[in-house]
Image (tube, rainbow, N blue to C red):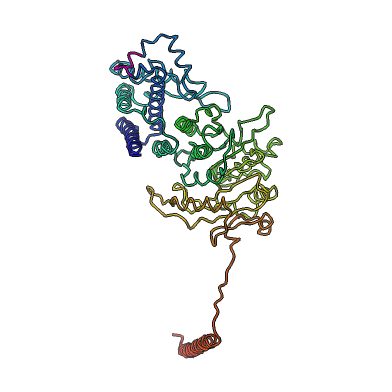
Amino acid sequence: MTTTVDFQNKTKELINGLKGICSTYGLGNDGDEYKVITQAFLYKFLNDKFTREIKQLKPELAQSENWQEEIEKISDEEYELLTMQLEADTAVFYPRHLIAHLFALQNKDDFAKTFDDTLMDIAIINNEIFSVRTVGGSKEPLFERISEIVEASERNSFCKAILNKLVEFSFEHIFEEKYDFYASIFEYLIKDYNNDSGGTYAEYYTPHAVAKIMASILVTEEVQDVTCYDPSAGSGTLLMNLAHAIGEDKCTIYSQDVSKKSSKLLRLNLILNNLVHSLQNIVRGNTILAPFHEKENGELQQFDYIVSNPPFKLDFSEYRDDLDTKKNRNRFFAGIPNVPKNKKSSMAIYSLFLQHIMFSLQEGGKAAVVVPTGFITAQSGIDKKIRQELVNRKILAGVVSMPSNIFATTGTNVSIVFLDKSNKEDVVLIDASNLGTKVKEGKNQKTVLNDQEEQQIIDTFNNKEVVDDFSVVVSYEDIKTKNHSLSAGQYFEVKIEYVDITAEEFETKMNSFEENLNSLFAESKSLESEIQNNFKDLRYL
């Protein structure tokens, strides 16, 4: 355990060191900084993964004093045979790609070009497995040129500084670690780059507590060969938690997200977490306008598990009318929000994602979606129609209303809606708004749940427990009588406590009440008389 913690700290030191280099070259907090940090980190990770595996395939390399020299002596034919034995999630490197090889070339006049060319060559060789697709069919490569981000006169020294930072570090002895280890590393790696400062498409990092609760409620039994989908995947926090709960080797990931940055971060997350086999299903594009994943007959693919934390409000007026077609009538059964005269940015795009998820859920499938809490009680419009459909079709498992400020970047109160196409009976409604501890995160206030509170929500939901002022279990008919409200508070019983007392105690209490009333009445008459006298004394001057 100590070794793991030490290595986590060393990994974070590597990340901080790369950030320090970016700051030195004027890229601190710059929009391009994340490209440098994530690509350098990924290059090192893939380099060390390849190195470790090639040494296992050819043990004499590991025993050599200078294995880099020995690997360059291997014939082309033998090298090809070795690369064919690599695990499917290991990128193919040739000796010219290795960090050790570049280190020997760092004093060349055109080193920056050599550095970039090396990354691009690795990307081309591994394009089939490691690229991210777009809805248009093109493939976005593993790496981009990074030296061109800085001034031409600084490029060689910039790339040299990055390389020297990578040489000082090694992943080789830690690859057996699993999700929990890399989850914390990934969070640290992207914490400054996946936030609400990205412009039109705000990229909120889903808190670990929300992701854990969603996965733990969705996955309650062993499953095999299932599909998992997120139509607004971001950097993949929800998908990673879901895959971890199921087992990375027992599920296939599918996703779509309009953000180029998020798709790159998701790719990195999949690589770190033994999910390279799903990279071919990671697509960049607009899910609402052009959903990518289809069956052979052209119909939209359906999935066993769906998770999503979609954007809540967004201006989609430019393509709003393109959605209102016969093809989309079934998908957007409850309707498409109209374009308001003012404040187009308030258009409730989450309602489209929720309808899309309902349409994309396999028979017997389960889903969990983060929504603004206002959705669960809206008395009219699209939100009400969606809730009615959930009840009428009996595909609702329950709702958890989370504490305010569970997301540090937005003050919007959120709830998690759980769907289950096999749940034809009781629905669980939880009000967890009073849980958590408020802490400061930068300039923002955030509510943090501890492990016991997270488990309380999970156990209460999965066991369908009724807890005073916390949870209720209701029928679909109960929900209909409450105007389809999914707020737990509207179902809590109003309790009147009765206390047994003797006749003498009752008489004493009544006498006390009577005395208090007489006193109040007397005081009232005195005040009334005083007010009347004062009124008579008033004169016009």
Q: Quadrant of residue 486?
A: bottom right
Magenta residues span 63-70
Q: Quick check: 156 left or right of 49?
A: left
Left or right: 17 as drawn, with respect to 209: left
> On the rendered structure, is 344 left or right of 479?
left
The magenta stretch spans residue 216: no
Quarter of the image with the C terminus is bottom left
Q: Report x, y in % for residue 326.
A: 71, 36
Q: Is residue 456 above or below residue 268?
A: below
Evaluate whether residue 124 shows in this view. Answer: no
Give the answer, above or below, for where 38 lies relative to 245. above
Q: Tell which of 499 and 531 is nearer to you.
A: 499
Q: Nearer the viewer, residue 430 or 349?
A: 430
User: Of 462 and 157, which appears nearest the observer?
Assistant: 462
Quadrant that contains the N terminus: top left
Q: Main secondary structure of the magenta part?
A: helix
Residue 125, position as x, y percentages in the image: 47, 17
